[in-house]
Image (spheres, rainbow, N blue to C red):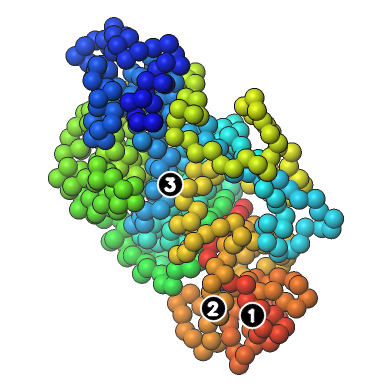
Amino acid sequence: MDRAEQVRKVLATRGLTLYRVSQQSAEIYGCPSPFFVPHSLYSDANQHSLIPTLAQMIALSRITNYLLYDWLAVFGVDLDQIPRLQSTVPRKRTALLDSSVYDTSAWVPWFSGRPQVDAVPAIAPLGQLLSEAAPRRARELVPADKGRFLYGKVGEEDVHAFPHLAVGSIFRVDTKRPEEHLCDARESPGRRLFLVEHVSGYTCSRLVLRAKDRIVLHSPQNSCVETELRLGKEARIIGVVDAEIRPVWERSLPRPPQRSAIWQRPRLPFPPSPQPSLSALLRNSRLRLGVSFREASSTSRWIASTLSDELYFAAPGTLSDYETLSSPPRHIQKIITLCVLYCIDFRGFLRACGLPFDQERREPIPDELVPRRAPNRSPGPHNPGGQEVRQETGGFLDSLLNNWEEVPLFLRGSLKELAGPRAFSLLDVFWVGGAKPALHPLLVNAALVVVNRRMKRPDPSTAKTIRGPSLYLLLTRASNYICGCCTLEEGKLVVRDYAGASHGTQRFRNGIEAEVIGRVTTILRRLL
């Protein structure tokens, strides 16, 4: 069905016609208002560059009592692309990500725990522990306490994060009572990693508490970048970094920046305004990330190519002009681009524009009238009435979810990018949470790893790499899995301990006593 017919059917579910919608928008907002819905909506609907503006979408949402996010989807705009692309774009500086799930009616593939006759293995394919179940609505998986955890991405210039976090790592921040974890940080670096907002942006760092209102950002690799900040005037502690999704497939590390590269930045307003204007929001967000208009424009070209829509591209001059505006751009695609470029959440963008935003009592548009892909539901129970079906989960799944407390659903669209430079499937995910003690520091408190099955040949023991020996997953002749640093030496697979451990070096004849399943590309681990 074409888009005009789709809009007509959506309005018909509320007993409305376009004439009546246009009339009501004039009564509520006035004819000259940007919220006025014109009579030409049907003819414009099929022209991609003439879809309704954001203000008109808000008017449609209010008049029909349907969610704004669903109306945007009807016109081909998927807001869940914002967190997906934000987590994919490389960042020079550490940034907070938009972790919202906008389409809460979306179907999410789900699993149930397999019955376990024996104890859960120390290391095992995830498919051995979980089985496919009926999909669930995203709203069933969104935690009630949505504000407790924040998510961010480590930038190339965040020298304080090294070596605790890696460039490109997605980290989780627990904002609940961070002061409780500062007790062990007096006069020496504490064990915890904190997310700190300061006058130049964000950083992940261990802290030294010098006084009640003074902290020092600690860098174990470069003491010259350690900086003392005053809490409340120059910095604030947002929370404790408690988990990381760490990429380990990159072959090189960026050179840590010098002090001048970090602290000779424009000083941003601190504390930041809770309700900045649109121009201030765009400018401060760009400066916090340290990107020029030319760099941002280049990234917008990539966004346009990824989404196959030229309207997502923004020229450097256009981006500069946006920082002088008080109203949002005409095209919603440009708004999506700005949110991705500058790590702005869509709700914050609406607030900065001064647009009304009341979605609490809005209803979702029926599945058959919005482009919401429904997955194969055959594994689960038949549900002809359309009622939500809650799945009973097994012990392993319950334990995993209880340990992690929430599922980062906003990352479900970017798993392939986070898992490494190849196609990704759940067959590549392995449980490693039972391997005690771990054979590598990065595997301490790790729960899951992603394995590239195409990379089965470890580096020779004589090879010199910046990161050292890579992590591999091995299967021994006794059907046991081993995960650790592995090299190839005279036809033997050599798995070595890390410095300070006492497990001993293990040697296996390659292909006889053990075989390589693949190289580890991503690690999901806890830091607390």
Residue 262 seen: yes
Outermost residue toward the front in this view: 1
Residue that mark 2 sits on: 469
When the figure is inspected, residue 201 is found, relative to residue 477, above or below; the finding is above
Mark 1 vs mark 2, CA separation in Å? 9 Å
In the image, what residue type sits under mark 1? Arg
Label 2: how many Cα within 10 Å (few below 14, some 14–19, many 20+)? some
Q: Is residue 523 left or right of residue 40?
A: right
Q: Nearer the viewer, residue 199 or 44?
A: 44
For the residues carrying marks 1 and 3, which lies nearer the camera in this image?
3
Q: Nearer the viewer, residue 483 or 198?
A: 483
Q: Secondary structure at mark 1?
A: strand
Image quarter hosting the N terminus: top left
Q: Is residue 312 left or right of residue 101?
A: left
Q: Secondary structure at mark 3?
A: helix
Please state the horizontal and vertical placement of residue 381, each as a whole percent of the image.
70, 36
Residue that mark 1 sits on: 496
Residue that mark 3 sits on: 84
Q: Kindly indicate the quadrant of the structure image that contains residue 481.
A: bottom right
